[in-house]
Amino acid sequence: MGAVRYKVAEAARLAGVSASTLRLWETQGLVVPERSPTGHRQYTEGDLARLKRIAWFRVERGLNPAAIREALEAEGAGDDAVSSAGEGGDNQVGRKLRSLRHAAGKTLEQVAGDIGIAASVLSTLERTSQGVSVAVLHNIAEHFGTTVSSLSGEEEADARAVVRAGEWRTWPRTTPGVTVQLLADGRNQMDCHRFVLEPGASSEGAYRHEGEEFVYVLSGRVEFILDSDQFYDLGVGDSLYFESKRRHAWTNRHDGETVLLWVNTPPTF
């Protein structure tokens, strides 16, 4: 029998908060639930324990989000609360990063300093596979000479000639508001993805790599910024083709979800 998963309304009720509060906490990186193949939030028992702890810190201690994260880490509650995700297959990104760091003989502080992030952020990523932007995750992967796709286990999937609608495999949910689904499995010459962006979701910074990429807007609206000074506002049916070595950043400008078809070749993302 599989592990229990809760929808957002049920998780909110059990945690004693509103559904909108759960979504806010997700944007703040306090708790990032899994996603179903169709993109719906799914909370685990570990997520519920974390939600209740966050609510206690907020109400009883009056802590802000940053202080709550520090408190969870300081007392080890973060490890306990996310054990169901942090030590299972959902934490493959964190485990791979930790293995790469140990193989390089570097401390959390050294790697975080090289990349320009707080050591606590990197620690949380290694433990939970959650809490960083796409741009930061890309920079971490580049630091270790690998790719985000590889860290996310994309190359390990058994190849399927046909991927049916709604049967997409999904990357571990490292970034709040961003769901990446695989449209083609296995080790290929193209990364073929379906990006689902919640309102306001963004790369939170620019990044670049080798290759070329093609983006097609299936629904919603997205803004791309190339080389910091070229802005492209894309709506349904619009597409964009650019060299990946150009610094690129993006933001969902729609008041609902934006869904993108995103192809990168060769698979350097």
Image (cartoon, rainbow, N blue to C red):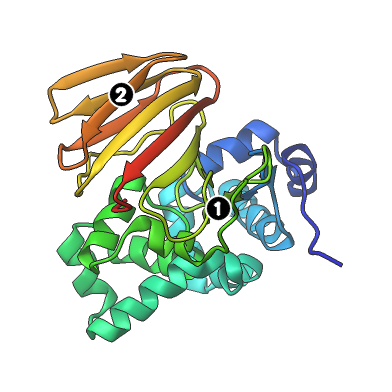
Q: Is residue 55 left or right of residue 152?
A: right
Closer to the camera in the image, 23 or 236: 236
Q: Give the x, y percent position of residue 234.
A: 36, 16
Closer to the camera in the image, 228 or 113: 228
Query: In what element is the residue under mark 1?
Result: helix
Which one is earlier in the sequence, the residue at label 1 or at label 2? 1
At a point 27% along the width and 61% down the height, the residue shown is: 140
Q: Give the x, y percent position of residue 200.
A: 44, 27
Q: How many marks?
A: 2
Say if 2 sits above or below 214 in the image.
below
Q: Is residue 203 left or right of residue 127?
A: left
Residue 240 - label: 2
- Which residue is the site of mark 1? 61
**Quarter of the figure that contains the N terminus:** bottom right
Estimate the spatial distance between the alpha carbons at disc 1 and disc 2, rounded to whole Å.
48 Å
Residue 211, by quadrant, is: top left
Closer to the camera in the image, 63 or 97: 97
Q: Give the x, y percent position of residue 154.
A: 47, 59
- Mark 1 residue type: Arg
Badge 2 density bin: few <14, some 14–19, many ≥20, Cα 10 Å: few
Badge 1 density bin: few <14, some 14–19, many ≥20, Cα 10 Å: few
Query: In what element is the residue under mark 2?
Result: strand
At a point 63% along the width and 58% down the height, the residue shown is: 50
Q: Give the x, y percent position of residue 121.
A: 35, 60
Closer to the camera in the image, 52 or 26: 26
At a point 22% along the width and 18% down the height, the residue shown is: 231
At a point 18% along the width and 65% down the height, the residue shown is: 113
The answer to whether one can see residue 75 in this image is yes
Of the two numbered discs 1 and 2 in the rendering, the one whose residue sits closer to the viewer: 2
